[in-house]
């Protein structure tokens, strides 16, 4: 199995600023892995709300994270303002896989690259459901899928 490589900044269509917090650092002086997953969730949901019209707590169909991973290449720490790149690596009829690159200003390759997959579910029936059309349209408008 080949070792994953950092992702080029040029692969990502959207960027979101995310400041690190004091609480993100662990005993080793760098951001703990759990902080990365919170950042990933934040930028994906920011896109879904701002561009896809998602209304948390109101929408009948929601995306559940069904798979996630992250490869780490260089540490980040407090205080740094990160730039998280967002792209879609796969768009299906009922799921989408996001890729998130973690960059510090001036970085040309990611310090970490994460992925997670949202499977869309009708909350009333708890059954798989198509991606809501407004979210699908936003994804198609912003990403090369």
Image (tube, rainbow, N blue to C red):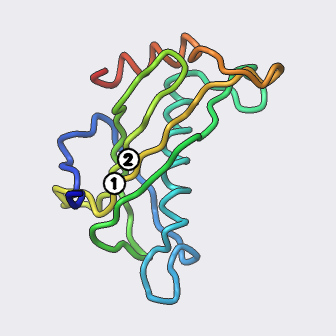
Q: Is residue 81 left or right of residue 59?
A: left
Q: Considering the image in quadrants, where does the C terminus appear?
A: top left
Q: Are marks 2 and 1 in contact (CB under 8 Å)?
A: yes
Q: Earlier in the sequence, mark 2 or mark 1?
A: 2
**Front one among 96 and 81:** 96
Vertical order, 131 against 48 (above or below): above
In the displayed structure, 82 sits above or below 130; it is below
User: Which residue is found at the position 40% from the left and 46% from the top?
Assistant: 16
The image quadrant where one finds the N terminus is bottom left
**Which residue was labeled with disc 1?**
113
Q: For numbered disc 2, what is the local secondary structure?
A: strand
The total number of labels drawn is 2
Name the spot of residue 98 as percent of width and height, x first: 42, 37
The residue furthest front is: 1
Q: Which mark is residue 142?
A: none
Taking depth in this image into account, of 130 and 136 the one nearest to the observer is 130
Q: Position of residue 82 (x, y in %)?
A: 37, 60
Residue 83 on image: x %, y %: 34, 54
Picture residue at 75% right of the left edge, 20% below the top: 60
Where is residue 107 drawn, in percent x and y? Answer: 20, 60
Looking at the image, which residue is at 41% across and 23% down? Answer: 91
Mark 2–mark 1 Cα distance, whole angstroms, equals: 6 Å
Q: Which element carries disc 1, helix, strand or loop?
A: strand
Left or right: 7, with 101 as reference point: left
Locate residue 45: give its quadrant. Answer: top right
Q: Residue at x 34, y 33 (%)?
A: 89
> From the viewer's perspective, is 32 left or right of 122?
left
- Please rate how many residues cluster around mark 2, counting C-alpha atoms within 10 Å: few if below 14, some from 14 to 19, many from 20: many
Residue occupied by mark 2: 100
């Amino acid at each position: 199995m080949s070792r994953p490589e950092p992702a080029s900044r040029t692969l990502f269509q959207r960027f979101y600023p995310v400041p690190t917090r004091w609480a993100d650092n662990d005993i080793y002086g760098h951001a703990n892995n759990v902080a990365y997953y919170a950042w990933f969730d934040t930028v994906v949901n920011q896109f879904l709300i701002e561009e896809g019209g998602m209304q948390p707590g109101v929408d009948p169909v929601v995306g559940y994270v069904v798979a996630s991973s992250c490869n780490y290449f260089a540490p980040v720490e407090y205080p740094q303002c990160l730039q998280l790149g967002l792209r879609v690596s796969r768009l299906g009829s009922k799921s989408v896989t996001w890729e998130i690159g973690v960059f510090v200003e001036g970085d040309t390759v990611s310090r970490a690259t994460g992925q997670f997959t949202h499977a869309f579910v009708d909350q009333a029936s708890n059954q798989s459901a198509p991606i809501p059309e407004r979210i699908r349209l936003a994804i198609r408008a912003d990403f090369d899928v």
